[in-house]
Amino acid sequence: MLKGLTRAGLGGNVGSIEQFVTAAAAHGFAAIAAGGQELEEWITAKGIEAVRDFLQENGVQIGTIGLSVQWRDTEEEFVSGLARLAKDAEAAAAVGCTVCCTYVLPSTDQDAAHFTALATRRLRTCAQILAPYGIQFGLEFVGPHHLRTKWKNPFIWGLRETLDWIDAIGESNVGLLFDSYHWYTNELGVEDILRLKAAQIVLVHINDAPDVPIADVLDNDRLFPGEGVIDLAGFLRALKQIGYTGVVAQEILTPKPLEQPTEELLQRSRDAFRKVYTSAGLE
Amino acid sequence: MLKGLTRAGLGGNVGSIEQFVTAAAAHGFAAIAAGGQELEEWITAKGIEAVRDFLQENGVQIGTIGLSVQWRDTEEEFVSGLARLAKDAEAAAAVGCTVCCTYVLPSTDQDAAHFTALATRRLRTCAQILAPYGIQFGLEFVGPHHLRTKWKNPFIWGLRETLDWIDAIGESNVGLLFDSYHWYTNELGVEDILRLKAAQIVLVHINDAPDVPIADVLDNDRLFPGEGVIDLAGFLRALKQIGYTGVVAQEILTPKPLEQPTEELLQRSRDAFRKVYTSAGLE
Amino acid sequence: MLKGLTRAGLGGNVGSIEQFVTAAAAHGFAAIAAGGQELEEWITAKGIEAVRDFLQENGVQIGTIGLSVQWRDTEEEFVSGLARLAKDAEAAAAVGCTVCCTYVLPSTDQDAAHFTALATRRLRTCAQILAPYGIQFGLEFVGPHHLRTKWKNPFIWGLRETLDWIDAIGESNVGLLFDSYHWYTNELGVEDILRLKAAQIVLVHINDAPDVPIADVLDNDRLFPGEGVIDLAGFLRALKQIGYTGVVAQEILTPKPLEQPTEELLQRSRDAFRKVYTSAGLE
Amino acid sequence: MLKGLTRAGLGGNVGSIEQFVTAAAAHGFAAIAAGGQELEEWITAKGIEAVRDFLQENGVQIGTIGLSVQWRDTEEEFVSGLARLAKDAEAAAAVGCTVCCTYVLPSTDQDAAHFTALATRRLRTCAQILAPYGIQFGLEFVGPHHLRTKWKNPFIWGLRETLDWIDAIGESNVGLLFDSYHWYTNELGVEDILRLKAAQIVLVHINDAPDVPIADVLDNDRLFPGEGVIDLAGFLRALKQIGYTGVVAQEILTPKPLEQPTEELLQRSRDAFRKVYTSAGLE
């Protein structure tokens, strides 16, 4: 399981993608999350060979790109993002990235059944556009309770429900973005992970939560791995046990960017991963 | 557009399927609705050639079979009905029937988003089992307002939402069972029909509604065509205009079976169809 | 059925797409074939509103774009064309074009079974990319006998086989580009058209063939409609009878561009269409 | 990897399915292949609980059922087998069997491209019928050279081609039945297995071949594992390395049933498996 970074939790000054790669490498990370357009611009600026060499020299891979398509609102907005998605996928594939992810908000102002129908078809279309590029599509269920009632109607926030929805989407390249934070806020256990197959998971996020009642855990109040109360050792061991070998990335969402210098936050991230990987017996 | 009968509205004594066919023929109907198992048993009893001859001599076709699969509850119940569906489809295809239908209740006690995901996958499976037999699968949206709140969570009852759901199901043999009663209780107009393509409609139901406020129209308080306030002439003309050539069947749901003798109800049906077909300029 | 033009048969100097539109309008045509990239560049240069106004003022629609993706050779080449396809589709949709077409060569140097498997998946991907833009995808079977043995292994050239292949591709927006020339060289008749449904046809080509044995008809030796021996009146009447209302475009493939001035060729096209439409009772 | 038996290679008197289960258990096998109808009849005769108990007490699972549908000939024959397939799948699922397999002959008297199109759609339908029962569908490519030219046109016999065909079929429950005999006659190596993912393989067959030139290896002239020249140790080690954990069953096809008593053949099978599993370091 490859240690990975997103920009969330590293303060506001991570810099260019090249600086991000270098910083990740320097602190023991083997993967980063990037944007598809960001990758395309990088490739255009430096040439694909130079980009590949740079990644290889740093021992860092692009673990995932975020889905740029707006699939939650109007059909016009949705369709207008699809050509961009193809370009994102092309850029991602060119640098060896095989994952694209989006998150699923647990409530919606739209009618729940109708929205499910629309979203099923739209996410299927996204999966179909990603597939020829060899890219898997990860859906992240989002557990914090306050978001379940933030919008008018409840939507999907559980593991079982998300797996059923993936079945409804019906494309073989769709799987889970599995985040310890949402595993925890759904009050799931190690046995729930052990019932999964590694092939159902396309990306893992690892974050920690403060010691407050689960119903009060806020989505953007995350701690670095090992700094909170989530059983991350059990989480990692279970993922290892089912054979997951992909990226495990932190995504420390906070009310505002952390004010520590980026270098300190990178060290804090490195130490956090070491701590939980060690407690899980992974290093 | 072929005039069709279901058993609903003909009292409790329509008799065997052969009697039903004979009665339909005698009163000017060209199609009836049947059960798949009923067809299989008839074929087993009489032989497929005799059944086909009987239908042809009476000038009556089997317009549709009802979906026997229970897709709204547990997965076990759902799966346990699929082998029966294959037999239903085989029997239907043997007698030239090309339509199978189910109805969609407008509310549900289940979580709406999760239920939509499950139902999308299950109805897709049904469509896939029907497809090799050349059978189209019709979904009937159900408009009466009282059913929209009968169960805990709102589901799907509108035309637009049903079409979007059909897209989510994603099989080319799925279309609408389009019922004048639900067209009326959704307060749709002729222009909504004119925006459809004939190929989107796999079966039409024609029923009339009493002169009460639309929000008070009950699902099982239907009148014979022409006896109520729905603009059935406009309904039929619009269907004709978009090129629909399939079956138009009445389905007179009532609180309890009508007490008139079946023969009288058949005559009433014949007269009802004559009246609305004439007013639509169809005969 | 809308009279349409492709550039094939109009000599080498049809000019810009605006000139092509103007010329088509001036000679009684209501549709032209264009390239997706050509449309995108036009929209970029003039703005989408101006392009739409121009088309509307001229009473000409973009009937189809050609598939720019290379689906017959390597996987790399195929995938490298998909982002372009999304842009093509976006441009086409912006101007109201709802059709994209490709042709199917009747023999191949590749192993036939393996190539069929690859091409089935690739054309499905193309259809999936076109679908969210509301664009249908037409496959043109190609009948001339000399092409059936031009490459090492026989592939698909017949109507029945193409329809079966469309079923294998399995996307509901895939249909036929139906060309009178291939109808003729397959020795099909009016009854074969009458067995089709209009919805199976996404575009029609109309061309005529010289009076030589059918086995000697060459693919690029086409005559203007009415100048040869194909029963184009029967062809058009049958299409009308099944309810086809789309574009009927000529595509006069010749060994080298015709040397007549374009203006004369446009008049010849106008007269050719008048002749066959009149003989079919369509005007 | 579970040791498995098919009836092929055990002489003509294996007896009832209960006797087959008992015999398999007595000789160290953990799985057998059965027929779907055979399972249904067994369940009907003894009751599902008794059947499950019997299998559990013997420590034997039903590793696979054979596809009973005739998908290679007429559409009528194909469709007529689908209701049976649903019953087969229901019976298989009831006893915990999660695999159904068919083989692919490497040549055909039909036109190769058209047959590929038909077979793609038909096998997709089979996969769709199996899916709701939780059953995977394995396609066995068949390598012996003499069969590649036995019928008029070459079809598919290689690993790469079969995987591409599985992509064309496009259902996520379709994978490989991977037979050492066809691996050998395709002259594939260990590295070809290592490029696979375990999830692509739904069943493994293990058979050995005589020491004749590969082009002369006959499909029905198979030896017990370890009695011939195939590198079965390498074969098994590679499957283990990629994480395959399913059934490995022998299928000793011979010109006529072997004449040794079944008991001796069972012992020979047991010894054969011991030999190759030991040489592979698996026991």
Image: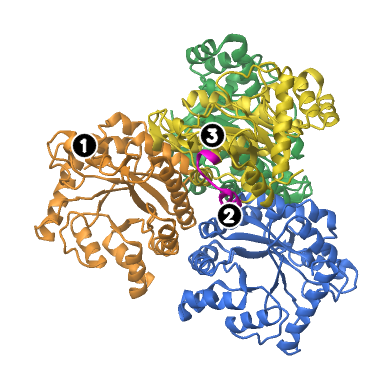
Chain colours: A green, B blue, C yellow, D orange
Give the CA distance from mark 3 to mark 2: 51 Å
Label 2 sits on a secondary structure element that is helix
Q: Which residues are magenta?
A: C184-196
Residue B50 spot, x, y in % from top left = 49, 78
Residue under pointer 1: D233
Which mark's residue is nearer the viewer, 3 or 1? 3
Left or right for C260, reference D18 = right
The 10 Å Cα crowd at callout 1, few under 14, some 14 to 19, many 20 or more, is many
Q: Which residue is mark 3?
A: C211
How many numbered marks, from 0 up? 3
Is residue D219 visible in the rendered image? The answer is yes
Q: Nearer the viewer, mark 3 or mark 2?
A: 3
| Mark 2, residue position | B124
Disc 1 is attached to a residue of which chain?
D
Secondary structure of the residue carrying numbered label 3:
loop
Outermost residue toward the front in this view: C211
Q: Amino acid at mark 3?
A: Asp
Q: Quadrant of residue B10?
A: bottom right
Image coords of residue C218 (percent x, y) = 50, 29
Q: Quadrant of residue B276?
A: bottom right
Q: Are marks 3 and 1 on the same chain?
A: no
Label 1, label 2: how far apart the Cα atoms are: 44 Å
Amino acid marked by disc 1: Ala
Q: Residue at x 66, y 47 (%)?
A: C239
